[in-house]
Each structure stands twice: as structure tokens, then as C-alpha cells.
Image (cartoon, rainbow, N blue to C red):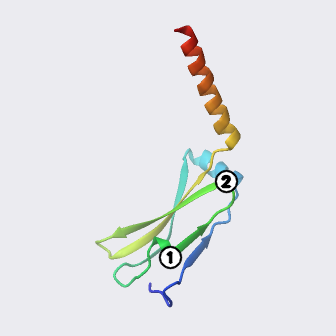
């Protein structure tokens, strides 16, 4: 895969809602879902991760990785999706931790 122009890019617009992704993750008992989006011949390519744009919906954390397979000469672009924790949940966890530390100090 080669670029037609130096500033060429590939855009992956992932259209899954946070709630739907959470259902899939809960069903699978996983924290992330991973997909292989595409593969290309490594030697003939001038693409790198900076040339690929990932768009996700609000509340979804997406990450792209290049997986090179020297035996086949192919590079695979892999997508990993996870749910960003709700700020209220994170605040509740931090609050509970602070209360437990305060109670522990008080006992000493």
C-alpha cells in the first residue's frame, strides 16, 4: 500500500455507541474488543500509524496498532476498543478510597 500524495491518510470512522460496546464487553467478559481491520505488504508500503485516523463515538477509547509478521511479509492494522469509565464512577471510587484512608488513619 503506497500513498498517492505525501499527506494521504486513511480514516476509520467506528460507529458503535458506548452502551452497545459495553453490552458486547459484558457479554464476552472482556475489557476490550479487538479487530484486524486490514493487512498490507510491509515492504511495498510507506504508511505508518500517523497516516491513519481513528474516529470513535463519545465515551469510547480506541487504539490502533501495527502488527508486523516477518514470515508472511504482511503488516496488519489492529483496532482495540474499550469503554471510558464514567466520571461519576471514577469520582465515587476515589471518594470511597479517601473515606477508607481517613477511617484507617483515625483508628491509629
Please tell me whether residue 84 is drawn above or below residue 76 in the rendered image: above
Q: Quadrant of the N terminus?
A: bottom left
Report the Cα–Cα distance between label 1 and label 2: 23 Å
> Hey, which residue is sitting farthest bottom in the picture?
4
Label 1 residue SS: helix
Q: Which residue is mark 1?
A: 51
Label 2 residue SS: loop
Please tell me whether residue 64 is drawn above or below residue 104 in the rendered image: below
Disc 1 to disc 2: CB gap under 8 Å: no
> Hey, which residue is sitting farthest left in the picture?
71
Q: Residue at x 50, y 76 (%)?
A: 51
Q: Residue at x 56, y 71 (%)?
A: 53
Q: Residue at x 55, y 78 (%)?
A: 10
Residue 27 or 73: which is nearer the viewer? Answer: 73
Residue 108 or 49: which is nearer the viewer? Answer: 108
Q: Which residue is mark 2?
A: 59
Q: Position of residue 73 (x, y in %)?
A: 32, 76
Q: Compare marks 1 and 2 and give the one earlier in the sequence.
A: 1
Quadrant of the image occupied by residue 66:
bottom left
Q: Position of residue 2 (x, y in %)?
A: 44, 86
Q: Does residue 70 appear left or right of residue 78 in this picture?
A: left
Q: Does residue 41 appear left or right of residue 25 in this picture?
A: left
Q: Does residue 26 appear left or right of residue 64 in this picture?
A: right
Q: Position of residue 83 (x, y in %)?
A: 62, 50
Please tell me whether residue 28 is drawn above or below residue 62 in the rendered image: above
Residue neighbourhood size for the residue with mark 2, other residues' Cα within 10 Å, grouped as few (<14), some (14–19), many (≥20): some
Residue neighbourhood size for the residue with mark 1, other residues' Cα within 10 Å, grouped as few (<14), some (14–19), many (≥20): some
Task: Using the image, tell me which numbered label, if any, was put on residue 74.
Answer: none
Amino acid at each position: 500500500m503506497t500513498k498517492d500524495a505525501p499527506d494521504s491518510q486513511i480514516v476509520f470512522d467506528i460507529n458503535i455507541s458506548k452502551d452497545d460496546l459495553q453490552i458486547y464487553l459484558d457479554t464476552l467478559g472482556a475489557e476490550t474488543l479487538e479487530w484486524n481491520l486490514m493487512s498490507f505488504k510491509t515492504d511495498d508500503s510507506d504508511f505508518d500509524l500517523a497516516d491513519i485516523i481513528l474516529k470513535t463515538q463519545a465515551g469510547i477509547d480506541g487504539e490502533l496498532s501495527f502488527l508486523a509478521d516477518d514470515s508472511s511479509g504482511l503488516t496488519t492494522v489492529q483496532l482495540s476498543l474499550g469503554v471510558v469509565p464514567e466520571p461519576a464512577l471514577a469520582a465515587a471510587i476515589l471518594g470511597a478510597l479517601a473515606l477508607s484512608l481517613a477511617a484507617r488513619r483515625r483508628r491509629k
